[in-house]
Every structure is written in structure tokens, then in C-alpha cells.
Amino acid sequence: MLIMLYLFLAGIFAGLIGSIIGIGGGILIVPFLALVLKTPIHLAIGTSMICVLATSLSASVRFFKKNMINTGLALVMEIPTTVGSIAGSITVAFLKNDVLFIIFGCFTIVSGIFTYLKNRFPEKFKPLKSAKTGTGSIFDSEYYDETSGKQVSYNVKNVTSGSAISVLAGFFSGLLGVGGGLIKVPAMNTIMNVPLKVSTATSSYMIGITAVVSSVIYFFNGFINPLITVPAVIGVLVGAVSGSFAVAKIKIKHMIAIILFVFISIGAMMFLRGFGILRY
Amino acid sequence: MEPLNKNNSKIEVILSCILITGVAASLLLMAAGMILLYLESGSFNISREPSMFIQGNNFFNFILDIFKGRGPENTALLLLTIGTIILMLTPFIRVVASLIYFIWIRDKKYIFITLVVLIILIITLSLH
């Protein structure tokens, strides 16, 4: 059986694609394990969470070097996110396989559409008008924008509403074994007026803590098997590091339609599997 | 109050070092475990025995057990388990380091925030 090799390759693939299109990779690992390798979905979710944790840690190192993480804001938002992820990680143990497949399917389809829109129409992703007025907060900061070559300062607004959405992001993260950045990043960007790059970096940094809490709860429930997790984690790290080099050279716009198609197909398969239509 | 991100390159370097060390140490142990597993069994088979799963009542106790030599008996599996645990503990150490830093610079607001995060983490790690 070459199952460990498949896990390793799946990890590389997820890490590579994840770092190129800016997602954690969990959304690709869970379906691969559950649909292709026929791993029980709870174990797939546990494995994915450890992979997400590894990606978050290695990505944070990169973001630190570019000074793009707002560590103060991250600490504050970690509190609601963690509470949400505890709730999600406990809930998953009570959910039947079919239900998880269905929720995961829906989440993947929505994520695919969102990723498509974000990359296809980046100019539409701007802070809301209400987020632009009013005074800032203690989280106001600045970062160096590589594209424009300028130091950009920004005010952080609506921390309370942002935190409320983080609870939801944490919940889905704990429930599905994904990072939850797909909810957090746009929320921070549009509601809290945090620049997209800083939102991405800060969200990724926060996922480290969220993932620890979830993976410890999974661990209590026996969802983590090192023999499955380790090959995938090694693969994800290799993939993510290679992806970070490739990302500068690849134009995402050209492949974004393919990505949308892949996400919707994966989502649909998970969905059908949940309803028992897709059996193998 | 000064924004945290300005002039705090010191803490960012420390946190960055913690993350790199954690990931590298864990990756090293995981790779060693995988190689050993291959040498021992001659293949990369996955046993589905429940004993192969990390499972326990308390994360801290589980770590203590490993230190006392009561972890998985198979060396390869032990390395894989420790590698996974180091990965899981890295963010925890990161929060502890942040707390020490905020106490050092006497930033009350952030000491409080970091303490809340740390308490949530400790509760999750020790309860159940």
C-alpha cells in the first residue's frame, strides 16, 4: 500500500495550491482524504487541522519578515475565534458523517465562489464606507506595501463586530478542520478597514492558536493518527514553501476559472456523498 | 498608547524564532520517524489499530507520560507523536513568550489580553 505516499503527495498539492491562491489548504485535504483515500471524515478533519496548523506557523514566519502581522489585533481577535473553534471542535464529534459531508460540501462551494470573486475582481474588495469614518483604535498600525513600495498606515475600526464574525470563523474552522481565513480575511478587510495583505497575514497568524485548540480537542476524541497526519504535514510544508517561491511568478488570474471549477466539483462531490447519492 | 506594530521588531524577531524552531524541530522528528518506520517495517503501511491513535484524557498528562517513557512503545511512532505534539505546542509557547514580553515592557492592556488567551488555551489543554 502506498497510502503514505499518497498522503504526502496530497499534502504537497494542497500546500502548493494553498499558498498560491492564498488559502490554508484544509479545504483540499479533507475531501482528498475522505473521498479518495476513504479515510473516515473525522480523521480527515483531524489530519487537515494539523496541516493547517503547520501552514499557519510557516506562513507566519514569512509574514513576520515583511512586518505584515498586526500582533496586537491578532491577540484580541484570538479570544472570540478560539471560543468559536472550541464550540466547533466539540460539535464535530456529535455530527454524523453524512451531515459533515453536506456542510463541508456547501462550505467548499461558497469558498470557491468567494476565492474566484476575490481574485477576479480584487477592486471590489474594499472597506465599507462606514468603516472609513470615525476615529481609529489602539490597533492602528502601518505596513510596507511591496507593490507600491510605500509605507501604508491604516486605522482599525469596528473591532467588536469583527470579533463577532471571528466567532463564526472559529466555529467553522473547528467543525470542518479548515483555517477559517475565508471568513475572517474579508471580514477584517471590509468591516474593520484592515488592508487585505495585513488581514491575510494576521488571520494566518491567528489560525495557529485556533488550530491548537481544535487539534487538542480532536486529540481527546481520537481524530488524530500520527501515521496519517505526519506524511500529510510534511507534504503540506514542502508544498507551501515551494508555493511561496512560485507565487511571484504565477499569474493567478489565468487559472482562477480552473480553481473555481475544482472547488465546485469537490464541493458537489462532498455534497452528493453526504446525501448518499455518490457511493463507491 | 503606541501602536503595537511600531518599534516592536524585537518581539517579532523572538516570535519568529519560536515559530521557526518549532516547525523545524517538529519536521525533523517527523522525518526521522518516517525513515525509522520504513526501516522497521520495510513499508509505509498504516495500521488501523486503535492503539496507534493519539488519544488521552489530558494533553499535559499525555506529554508527561511520554517523558516518563509511557508513550508509544514503537520508537518510530514515538517520534511521529512527539513531532506532532511539538507542532501543537509551538503556538502555545508563542503566547507565553508574548506574555513575558508584555510583562517586561509593562503594557497592562496587552498583559490582560494575552492572559485571557493563555487561560483559554490552558483550560482546553488541561480539562476534559
Image (spheres, coloured by chain):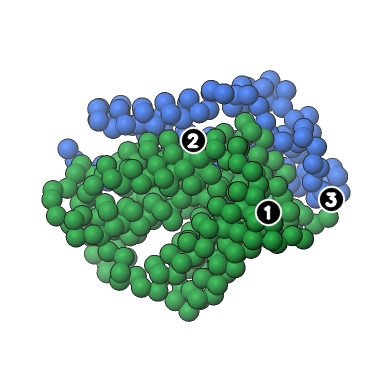
Q: Which of marks 3 and 1 is in front?
A: 1
Mark pair 1, 2: CA separation:
23 Å
Q: Taking A190 as reference, is A93 above or below it?
A: above
Dot 2: few (<14), some (14–19), or many (≥20) neighbours within 10 Å?
many
Residue bearing the label numbered 1: A34
What chain is colored blue?
B
Residue bearing the label numbered 2: A86
Q: Taking A117 as reference, is A100 above or below it?
A: above
Q: Quadrant of the N terminus of chain A?
A: bottom right
Q: How many labels does the image show?
A: 3
Q: Where is residue A173 in the image (x, y as percent from the top left)?
A: 49, 46
Residue bearing the label numbered 3: B43
Subunit bearing disc 1:
A
Question: What amino acid does circle 3 point to?
Answer: Ser
The answer to which quarter of the image holds residue B48 is top right
Subunit bearing disc 3:
B
The answer to which quarter of the image holds residue B70 is top right
Question: What amino acid does circle 2 point to?
Answer: Ile
Farthest left residue in view = A134
- Colour of the chain lettered A: green
Q: What element carries label 2?
A: helix
What residue is shown at x 23% (from left), y 59% (from top)? A128
What residue is shown at x 73% (from left), y 54% (from top)? A38
Question: What amino acid does circle 1 point to?
Answer: Ala
The answer to whether mark 3 and mark 1 are in CB contact below 8 A is no
* Marks 3 and 2 share the same chain: no
What residue is shown at x 53% (from left), y 27% (from top)? B125
